[in-house]
Image (cartoon, rainbow, N blue to C red):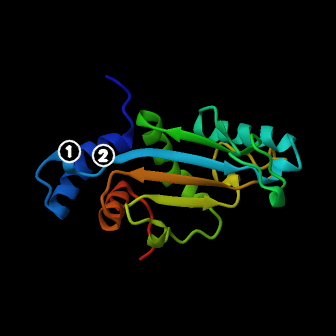
Amino acid sequence: MTNEPRLKIKYREEIIAKMKESFGYTNNLEVPKLEKIVVNIGLSKGLQDPKFLDVAEGTLKKITGQKPVKTLAKKSISNFKIRQGMPVGMVVTLRGTIMYDFLDKFINITLPRVRDFRGISPKFLDKDGNISIGFKESISFPEVKSEEIEKNHGLQVTIKTTAKNKEKGLALLKFFGFPFQN
């Protein structure tokens, strides 16, 4: 018996049936599903402080369990003191089992730890049913200890679905347990 994530089992056994009932799908493969989760950090502070790159990489590695990929500037922008080829961000893309494990931790542990959290606004969804959530502080994640952080920084979590519109994406994420505002 493999150790299958809780949310993957919930999707297969409960969510597919609920989505078919709600939207009149006839085939299981028509039902929207999670495609990937992208966790991203912008490195604007890294332009002045090269040590910040290591701090951000370590934080992202702790949170996701994967080594981040540095995104480089495609062209120079003199007003921002950016030269072509400089690192301007770090990104990790999660798929499969790791994605479901991260999502479970994200919904049940991380979001409730956010200060003054009253639910996610449905306005955060785009027209295709994907959601992007920004965090001002990375200490909301349980792997990041506030004592160990030298420099606090934000990050962004984007959840990509195969939904065709906002309504279906919102329903899918609600069935997964996302705490949306009413």
Identity of the residue drawn at 33% across and 51% down? 162
**Residue sitting nearer the eye, 92 or 21:** 92
Decide: is 166 above or below 51: below
Decide: is 141 above or below 58: below
Mark 1 sits on what residue?
A: 29
**Residue sitting nearer the eye, 119 or 94:** 94
Label 2 vs 1, first from the N-terminus:
2
Relative to 145, 5 lies left or right:
left
The furthest residue to the right = 48
Q: Name the secondary structure under disc 2.
A: helix
Amino acid on which the number 1 mark rests in the picture: Leu
**Residue sitting nearer the eye, 144 or 173:** 173
Q: Please tell me whether mark 2 or mark 1 is closer to you in this view.
A: 1
Mark 2 sits on what residue?
A: 10
Identity of the residue drawn at 41% across and 77% down? 182
The furthest residue to the top = 1
Relative to 108, 89 lies left or right:
right
